Image: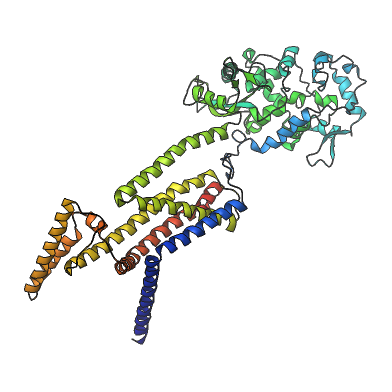
Amino acid sequence: MVANDCEEAISIRAEIYIEKIIKRYSTFVVKHSWCFLLLGFSICIVLGLSSVILHDLPDFNDPTKGFVPRGKNTLTSRLFVLEKIKAKLDQQLATAKIINQGKESLSKSSPAFTNQINGKYQEDDDDFEDDDSLNQKDLEEDLRANPYGCAFQSLSQNQCLNNLEVYELLNNGTDFLKTSKVIQSQLYKPNEHMCTSIDLNRHYEVYFETSDSLATNLLDIDNLLSLCKKQYELVDLFQLHATCHYTLPEMVAYFSNKSDCRQLTASDIPIFIDRIQRCHSLYDTGLMRFAGLKRYRAAPIDLFQYDTCFRFNFSFLTLEYLLDKTFLSTNETRYTAMWFLKPTKPIISANGSEIHTSNTAHDLFIEHFYQNSKFDDGRTKISALNFMDIRIPSAMKQIRADMFFVILAISLIVGVTVIYLRSITVALMTNICVGLSFACAYFSYKIIFGIDLFPYINLMATFILIGISCDNVFVIFDAWYSEKLDIYNEARLNKRKIEFYGKLTTKQEKQYKRDWDYTASIVSQRLTLKDDVEQHNKDETGEEKHFDSIKNTDLIRMMKVNEQQMIQMMIGVLRHAAASVFVTSFTTSAAFFTNMISRIAYVQLFGLFM
């Protein structure tokens, strides 16, 4: 019993204490409203400016920044994301321009290399030698003369793989890739980079798969001929006849010493597979990739330079970019890529505009590839595209276009708020408060948590916050209206004169007079029938119903209230609406905070910022 009394006493004291706090806060807000607004406004502005001054503004030019997928077969697959190797390939471009003046070949006295090199390409490496002059025995003599000489730097670059070790990885045998003069002329384009190197910044990528979901292997003669036909169509479409391109049917043809993929036969496919599989061990050790990227820095003996696994980088390019990652274990490929390099020098069209730019590539995609089944012939079809790395510029272009819908959403929310509240001022203040809250959140995000990455998706917080804040405004407004209605009814019951802002319309005057007369009759009935409990209850029910259903709500909106009544209304609003606003805001925050468990950085940061 004593415990219950103590709990009740504590509860009563807590309620009294809370009532005092609410009353003091309400009094402060009403009496010092401008001070309250200016203080909050100043704090938010200072926090926002400090975060902008101390840290650079966010850069939205790369919408993929911060995207961190996890797990097997995610977007980090070789077919879809190439950024991880971009730096190394850029290094390859730089080193390709360096002439290796100091290389010393152990086989320079061999009669296999006494022929003159084509003067036009003398500055490049000896890939231009006439293949007819190759003598396998003379080249193998270089290996026997220096078996422990350095062939390739190891992956750690602190030791060399000697010639004998590399020869063992080649199954103690050689397989020279002999190419015709026609093929060699196709590889070396005038005024262009050699077609043995790759520049990820200057190409069109088109990825293909089979149209038949049951027969997924592209290494089929019909599929290869289908891809070959599309290769020529794409060269014409992209206007890239004078530049390099890498395709699977073209490589299969090269490995059979055929200059045109339209000459392919079914017997060429096993030859291609056998020659690529021979390089399996080299590829697994990483030497193929390393040698392909570093081939212009240190030249191995000519026996290896002319081997299929190293010649022209064909095997490296094929395994790295043209075949599926499961090929070495299955001899099949489900996907393949076609790469078309744009010219090194700008090309001007007939109308004077430059082609092969991000804008023209985007227009090309929209016109010929977007929702277009033109390249699906029943054998192969397009599965993915990447034109000159325009994914990010195109994404930003689309995002900026979609900002119209964001503005439209904000306008609709503001419009509904104005219609419901019938106050442009309240709607405007709501949006200003959202902007100020955005500044405070940005300060916490950048300064307190020290997060530099600010992805584009965080801008969605703007109109999401407007929607959430409007919900809270509606709750507060309804509570405010109810409190004002109580004061209106109280004034009527006490027969106090009510003043209004502005002049009432005829309809409002009639409504006010009708309410006043009805209230007088209700008071009279209470005085005459106060002993009749049942009738009294009925009258009270009718009275409250009439009081709560004011037909012209503008009377309540236009009614003037004094400072004391304003404090009374504020206390009532805090009692009835504060809990609802807190609960809705807390549950919304909790919902966004659950995004922190995601493994995607974008989603994590968006949840934290919200």
Of 295 and 228, nearer the camera is 295
Q: Quadrant of residue 70?
A: top right
Whole-percent x, y for residue 203 in the image: 63, 26
Q: Position of residue 479 (x, y in %)?
A: 30, 61
Tell whether 535 sits left or right of 98.
left
In this rendering, the count of numbered labels is 0
Taking the image as shown, residue 297 lies to the left or right of residue 213, namely: right
Instruction: Please tell me whether residue 492 is drawn above or below residue 16 in the rendered image.
Output: above
Residue 184's quadrant in the figure? top right
Determine whether 459 is above or below 381 in the image. below
Which of these two is toward me, 464 or 112?
464
The colour mode here is: rainbow
Q: For residue 97, say whether it is visible.
A: yes
> In the image, residue 214 lies at what x, y percent?
50, 28
Q: Is residue 560 above or below residue 464?
A: below
Q: Residue at x 32, y 51 (%)?
A: 423
Camera-side residue of 445 and 218: 445
Residue 66 image offset from top left, x and y in percent: 59, 45
Q: Residue 8 or 220: which is nearer the viewer?
A: 8
Is residue 281 visible to the viewer in this orientation of the structure? no
Q: Residue furthest front?
A: 503
Which quadrant holds the N terminus? Answer: bottom left
Residue under the image location 81 percent in, 13 percent down: 132
